[in-house]
Image (spheres, rainbow, N blue to C red):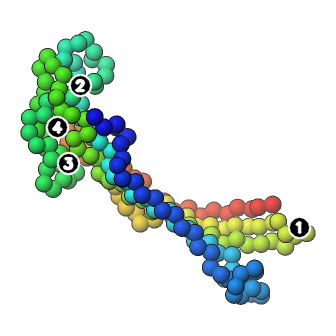
Amino acid sequence: GLSNADRPQMFSAAAIYNPPFGRGERWLRSGFGAAVAGNWEFTVIARTESGTPVVITASGDPANIGNTQYNYDRPNLVGNPHVANPSDAEWLNPAAFQQPVYAFGNAPRGLIRNPDYQDADTSVIKNIAIPSQDNKLMLQLRFDAFNALNLITRGGVDGNFTDNPTFGQIHSIGSSPRQLQFAAKFYF
């Protein structure tokens, strides 16, 4: 079956834009306008990934081999595990599974996938040159937004089948809510 970390589709893109204003640039090369409009940097990193396989297990020791420490077994597949409109309350069809009795379950790995993941991070950076003998002093002011669009990605599906009323449901988020950060760096 599929690895627990299998993600068949992943896309990541990054962009950096430096407006053409300020010292050494095309426009506003000197004066007050260069100081205000120059040395800005805008960045974005966006990522989207397909979901990992849901690990569906039958807890306990249904195959009666003496191992009660690890969820090694899977339930039996007796129906269609897919639902027409997956939701947090029902990501998969619990009635499609049955507890095996003195046997290893026959449900294959990777039947259902966890929700997809999306994220976009952005930064706005202003570099301020500080006059010095070697012109190497600089103050950087930056504003970062992690998960800037506040995309809430659902968490993993509860895949523990045995006597579990939340089997097939999602009760967590897979991403962090938007986080904003302001920072100052001094380069010398």
Q: Secondary structure at mark 1?
A: loop
**Numbered label attached to residue 73:** 2
Q: Which residue is mark 3?
A: 91
Residue 173: percent from left, percent from top: 34, 50
The Cα atoms of the two marked residues, 3 and 1, are separated by: 62 Å
The reply, left or right, for residue 117 in relation to residue 143 is: left
**Numbered label attached to residue 62:** none
Name the N-terminal-most of marks 3 and 4: 3
The Cα atoms of the two marked residues, 3 and 4, are separated by: 13 Å
Please tell me whether mark 2 or mark 4 is closer to you in this view.
2
The image quadrant where one finds the C terminus is bottom right
Look at the numbered discs 4 and 1 and tell me whether their residues touch, using CB distance below 8 Å: no
Residue 67: percent from left, percent from top: 28, 15
Q: Secondary structure at mark 2?
A: loop
The Cα atoms of the two marked residues, 2 and 3, are separated by: 21 Å
Residue 122 visible in the current orientation: no
Q: Amino acid at mark 2?
A: Asp
Q: Quadrant of residue 129?
A: bottom right
Q: Amino acid at mark 4?
A: Pro
The Cα atoms of the two marked residues, 2 and 1, are separated by: 67 Å
Q: Residue at x 80, y 71 (%)?
A: 130
Label 2 crowding class (10 Å Cα cut-off): few <14, some 14-19, many 20+?
many
Q: Amino acid at mark 1?
A: Asp
Q: Which of 153/105 is in front?
A: 105
Q: Which residue is mark 4?
A: 165
The reply, left or right, for residue 82 in relation to residue 45 is: left
Name the N-terminal-most of marks 2 and 1: 2
The Cα atoms of the two marked residues, 4 and 1, are separated by: 68 Å
Name the N-terminal-most of marks 3 and 1: 3
Label 4 crowding class (10 Å Cα cut-off): few <14, some 14-19, many 20+?
few
Q: Residue at x 67, y 63 (%)?
A: 184
